[in-house]
């Protein structure tokens, strides 16, 4: 779909809902629609090189968070001195596209790019890894032993997939989302197990899904299992998206093929979604699609030979009664259950990289501790952090980063100028939950933990218009809007 066709289609859908194009653009705090409909408006809002302040800024991490921050900072300073440290030369991949890659809608080339192609002007790139941090002295060390000094540090290093926490998968160890991993590919080959949280894993997920569909089409009963771990993860809705998409792909083949597959979701959480309105909608969607879900189940072991996933199922029971408090003690109980699978999609536990988590700039739980509104480090005032690695209650999505990086740049420049940090991140998070091929529920919320829709439409409804947004608009918004610091 070319740009003009997309704009016309998007506009038609808005008009159907009684919303004018002008009003929609005004209402679109998402910014994505206005970016394609009228890029000059976005460019007009691009900050000019207004600040004359000078300082050396080092950014650890060259993914979406790091490059977007560098671009906006370079746009905002008269004489920028900005260095990105990034070991992976394909770090600016379009990670939200992994869901489409894992369901056969995208190919690998659609989500992975050369970092240098998106490197902002006036920004230096060091192709290495930061491994030691000395915040008291304002420097860090690279893996090659080089010392890098800074006046201000931005930590945007993303997170690590931690397979070592699952018994039977320890050999996989730590891997990154954007990482060619021959070890990973060999380990999971022909096992029916995969994760779309790694790009090569997403490719394998589509292969595994195709195999399951073929078996189901031939009348062979199949068991598809999807997991959600007991750690914070990037894009909390993604483990459900791939399940919805398998359901859609099966129905494309035949009703009988779908009936031959038992689909079950196992979530560590006591909820299907943290926002009640969206959770209620998801539960109704699961019921309508005959998709099963199980709460309070954490994946702890996988037997690849026997194709058994072991879950720790836990719950609370009343214990002794405390007469003084007039309440019962609550005791956590648990049991381990074995689940047979033919297809297993693992959302692995996730963590901050050890070299950051275990450093002075890390915290007890690994993430970089920042003020959740200003994104400034709680201890070191010349350090800021955003994206997946920041210890922010909400915000491990690309949509959150689109709000965060603007706040961070504003506050970083204020800090450089010795001014008060007035820009605040409001916790905005957006999760386009793909419920079908051609349908998306756009879940938007903030610190209030209530829906905060950008358009005056029922946010709990699945809509074709949000499918257009997800499939056609968000990717160019990311590539040419965020990575240029303009959207």
Image (cartoon, helix red, strand yellow):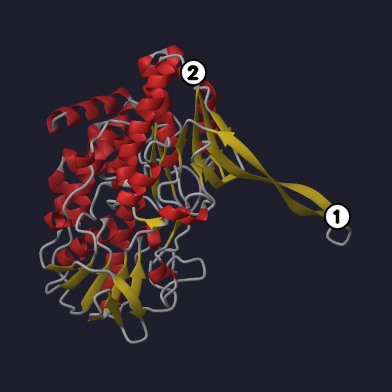
- Decide if residue 328 is on the left or right side of residue 170: right
Q: Residue at x 40, y 47 (%)?
A: 235
- Would you place residue 449 above or below residue 464 in this image? below
Residue 163 position in % (x across, y down): 45, 53
Number of the label disc, if any, that sits on residue 343: none
- Would you place residue 468 above or below residue 131 in this image? above
Is 303 in front, or is 287?
Answer: 303
In three-dimensional space, the C-alpha distance between marks 2 and 1, rounded to whole angstroms, equals 47 Å
Q: Is residue 464 visible?
A: yes
Contact between labelled residues 1 and 2, with CB atoms less than 8 Å apart: no
Circle 1 sits in a helix, a strand or a loop, which is it? strand
Q: Which residue is mark 2?
A: 260
Residue 239 position in % (x across, y down): 44, 40
Residue 35 position in % (x across, y down): 20, 44
Q: Within the image, what quadrant is residue 256 found in?
A: top left
Q: Nearer the viewer, mark 2 or mark 1?
A: 2
Q: Residue at x 21, y 47 (%)?
A: 112
Q: Within the image, what quadrant is residue 464 found in?
A: top left
**Other-residue count near label 2 (Cα within 10 Å), few / some / many at <14 / 14–19 / ≥20:** many
Q: Is residue 27 visible?
A: no
Pick out the residue farthest to the bottom: 137
- Decide if residue 295 is on the left or right side of residue 7: right
Q: Residue at x 40, y 16 (%)?
A: 217
Pick out the residue farthest to the front: 305
Give the position of the N terminus as an image quadrant.
top left
Residue 228 position in % (x across, y down): 50, 44
Is 309 in front, or is 446?
Answer: 309
**Other-residue count near label 1 (Cα within 10 Å), few / some / many at <14 / 14–19 / ≥20:** few
Q: Which residue is mark 1?
A: 320
- Would you place residue 357 above or below residue 55 in this image? above
Tag 1 or tag 2, which sits nearer the N-term? 2
């Amino acid at each position: 779909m070319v740009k003009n066709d997309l704009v016309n289609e998007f506009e038609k859908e808005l008009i159907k809902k009684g919303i004018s194009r002008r009003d929609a653009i005004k209402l679109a705090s998402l910014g994505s629609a206005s970016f394609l409909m009228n890029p000059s408006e976005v460019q007009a809002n691009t900050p000019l090189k207004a600040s004359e302040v000078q300082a050396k800024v080092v950014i650890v991490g060259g993914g979406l968070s790091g490059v977007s921050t560098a671009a906006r900072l370079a746009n905002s300073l008269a004489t920028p001195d900005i260095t990105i440290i990034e070991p992976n030369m394909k770090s600016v991949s379009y990670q939200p596209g992994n869901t489409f890659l894992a369901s056969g809608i995208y190919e690998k080339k659609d989500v992975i790019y050369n970092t240098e192609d998106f490197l902002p002007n006036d920004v230096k790139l060091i192709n290495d890894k930061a491994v030691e941090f000395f915040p008291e002295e304002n420097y860090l060390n690279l893996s090659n032993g080089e010392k890098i000094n800074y006046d201000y540090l931005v930590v945007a290093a993303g997170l690590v997939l931690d397979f070592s926490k699952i018994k039977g998968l320890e050999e996989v160890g730590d891997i990154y989302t954007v990482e060619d991993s021959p070890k990973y590919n060999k380990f999971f080959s022909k096992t029916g197990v995969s994760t779309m949280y790694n790009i090569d894993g997403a490719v394998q997920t589509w292969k595994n899904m195709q195999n399951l569909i073929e078996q189901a089409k031939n009348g062979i009963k199949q068991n598809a299992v999807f997991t959600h771990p007991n750690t914070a993860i990037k894009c909390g809705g993604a483990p459900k998206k791939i399940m919805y998409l398998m359901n859609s792909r099966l129905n494309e083949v035949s009703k009988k093929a779908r009936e031959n597959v038992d689909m079950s979701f196992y979530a560590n959480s006591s909820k299907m979604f943290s926002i009640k309105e969206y959770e209620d909608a998801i539960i109704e969607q699961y019921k309508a699609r005959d998709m099963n879900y199980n709460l309070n189940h954490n994946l702890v072991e996988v037997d690849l030979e026997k194709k058994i996933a072991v879950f720790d199922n836990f719950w609370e029971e009343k214990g002794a009664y405390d007469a003084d408090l007039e309440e019962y003690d609550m005791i956590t109980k648990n049991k381990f259950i074995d689940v047979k699978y033919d297809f297993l999609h693992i959302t692995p536990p996730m963590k901050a990289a050890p070299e950051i988590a275990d450093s002075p700039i890390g915290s007890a739980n690994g993430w970089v501790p920042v003020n959740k509104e200003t994104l400034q480090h709680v201890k070191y005032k010349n350090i800021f952090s955003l994206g997946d690695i920041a210890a922010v209650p909400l915000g491990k999505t690309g949509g959150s980063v689109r709000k965060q990086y603007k706040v961070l740049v504003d506050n970083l420049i204020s800090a450089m100028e010795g001014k008060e940090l007035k820009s605040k991140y409001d916790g905005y998070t957006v999760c386009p939950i793909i419920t079908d091929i051609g349908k998306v529920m756009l879940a938007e919320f903030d610190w209030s933990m209530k829906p905060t829709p950008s358009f005056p439409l029922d946010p709990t409804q699945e809509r074709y218009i949000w499918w257009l947004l997800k499939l056609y608009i968000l990717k160019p918004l990311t590539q040419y809007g965020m990575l240029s610091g303009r959207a």
